[in-house]
Amino acid sequence: MATVSADCRPVASHPVHEVLTASAVDLGEGTPVRRLLPKRQRANIGAWCFVDHYGPQDIAGLTGMSVPPHPHIGLQTVTWLLEGEVLHRDSLGTKQLIRPGQLNLMTAGRGIAHSEESPADHPPVLHGVQLWTALPDRWAGVEPSFEHLPELPTAQTAGIRVTVLMGELLGARSPARTYSELVGADLAIGAATDEDVALRPDFEHGAVVVSGEAAVDGVVLGPGKLLYLGTGRDHMAVRTAGPTRLLLLGGEPFGEPLILWWNFVARTSDEIAKARADWKAGTRFGEVHGFPGPPLKAPPLPPGRLRPR
Ligand code: MN
């Protein structure tokens, strides 16, 4: 996944409506995924630089998710489920099951490897998101770590139950470790709603509908769309006709051009090539134990140098 592009747009210095349409990707074993970031025209929203939405998928009697051990650098992986269960293993020795309402947060820093799978005896439906935050340059080489948050803070408005994954929204603050000013929140709406959600004007924001349908600032969204909202907003209008789940992602404009290639976030082509070589050589990242299968092989590097955007 090379994301080199000349037509990537800068941070919007004012409120905008920019609808990004998901690309379909297959992570193997038939898990269909909607990739909403990065896109050709937009690399990130604050530090959020990767958004995959998968399911809901009926995996009764099937393997379900099966992502073999693979390496990361320079980012945090943020795992959030709407339905089902996923078992995380990593090269720090972590083995952690995650369920809806919980957060798995893995800080890759200088390098870590992990795998993700549906447990053998799993619920019938799998539905969730895999998000990445880019680490600012001064933290990009931090020691790898893993946190599991079994419960997250919530806030309740008239019609919206807000769960804060990272950062703060409506006075609720997540204890998850962040490395830049950002927010990630799940908005669960049970019935017809017409409300304003307060936002930080210095943040840029994006909204993703993961189930149902919502008009966000008047733009109708369903699964497979991300609405980029720009900066300069003190609220976001949310209107729904029925049960809806919405993800709000935002942060201070990141301000550092990044290279995303495969599972790596870096600043230079050389850092990417070195990480790839280290994975191939079996150094730096450690070993993931217990996954039923071999690790992933890195794809070949594209010709020429990778350029940040
Ligand atoms: Mn991963």
Image (cartoon, rainbow, N blue to C red):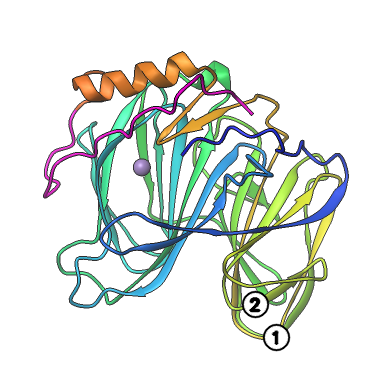
Q: Can residue 70 be seen in this view?
A: yes
Amino acid type shown at disc 2: Glu
Residue 240 lies left or right of residue 137; in this view the side is right
Image quarter of residue 212: bottom right
Q: Earlier in the sequence, mark 1 or mark 2?
A: 2
Question: In this picture, is 91 found above or below 195?
Answer: above
Query: At 88% from the left edge and 45% from the top edge, which residue is drawn?
Result: 14
Taking the magenta stretch, the answer to whether it contains residue 291 is: yes
285 and 6: which is toward the camera: 6
Question: In this picture, is 242 found above or below 3?
Answer: below
Determine the main secondary structure of the stretch shown in magenta.
loop
**Residue 149, horizontal then vertical, whole percent:** 40, 49
Taking the magenta stretch, the answer to whether it contains residue 22 is: no
Question: In this picture, is 91 found above or below 128?
Answer: above
**Residue 40, horizontal then vertical, whole percent:** 63, 44
Specify start and end residues of the magenta stretch as a single range.
287-309
Query: At 45% from the left edge and 24% from the top edge, which residue is drawn?
Result: 303
Residue 78 lies left or right of residue 296; in this view the side is right
**Residue 5, horizontal then vertical, whole percent:** 64, 34
- The label number, if any, that marks residue 241 in the structure image: 1
